[in-house]
Amino acid sequence: MIDASNIQLVASDFNDHLIDITDGSQVTLLGAPQGGHILLVGARIKAAGDCQLVANAALRDTATNRVLGLEQRPLLLERRSDGWAVPRRGLDAMPNVAVCPASAASTMIYNHEYKLEVTLMTLDEQPVASASAMITPTCLPTDGFCEGDCAAF
């Protein structure tokens, strides 16, 4: 297992830049090509070994314990000279957690706090590391569909 000090949750913003996620972070909901809104999330890791990993990411409503969005996919990492491996840019590089619209939500998704959970595994699904943070998904002011997509049913 990777030590907790060697994993950092990250999200891609609307400019395709990686931002670190910690408790209390605001994470931008991105319009998905197929419709709805997603969180594009993953992790950067500091590890000496293989960087061919699978990431499982979930957004959980802590009031109901329901999973609002879940996705598992290969985490495509690039090694950096500082010893960290970071996700590549693009929709294929990290889990696209589809959270809007969400029939499991008891309240609107945007501007409310939820728990983001990310588990990293080897290709044969052996756990390597996990991390979580309380985040607040947010809508871009220029995204006219986000608030409607992310409203409670």
Image (cartoon, rainbow, N blue to C red):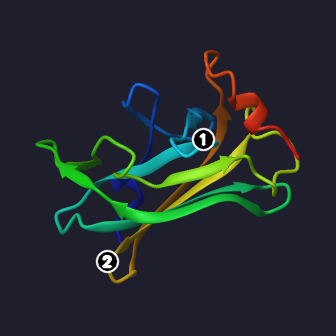
Residue occupying the point 85% across, 60% down: 64
Q: In which quarter of the image is residue 36?
A: top right
Would you name the residue on which mark 1 appears?
23
Q: Regarding mark 2 in the picture, which secondary structure is present there?
A: loop
Spot occupied by residue 44 in the image (x, y as percentages of width and height): 33, 50
Marked residue nearer the N-terminal end (1 or 2): 1
Which of 112/23 is in front?
A: 112
Which of 148/83 is in front?
A: 148
Residue 12 bears which disc, if any? none
Q: Regarding mark 1 in the picture, which secondary structure is present there?
A: loop
Position above or below: 138 against 64: above
Q: In which quarter of the image is residue 148?
A: top right
In the image, farthest residue toward the top: 142
Spot occupied by residue 31 in the image (x, y as percentages of width and height): 56, 35
Horizontal relation, residue 116 to residue 55: left or right: right
Residue 123 bears which disc, if any? 2
Dot 2: within a 10 Å radius of its alpha carbon, few (fewer than 14), some, or many (20 or more) residues?
few
Tell which tag, 1 or 2, sits nearer the viewer. Answer: 2
Spot occupied by residue 66 in the image (x, y as percentages of width and height): 78, 63
In the image, farthest residue toward the front: 34
Quadrant, the N terminus: bottom left
Spot occupied by residue 67 in the image (x, y as percentages of width and height): 71, 62
Q: Which amino acid does label 1 sit on?
A: Asp
Q: Which amino acid does label 2 sit on?
A: Leu
Q: How many labels does the image show?
A: 2
Horizontal relation, residue 110 to residue 7: left or right: right
Residue occupying the point 63% across, 35% down: 24
Horizontal relation, residue 27 to residue 130: left or right: right
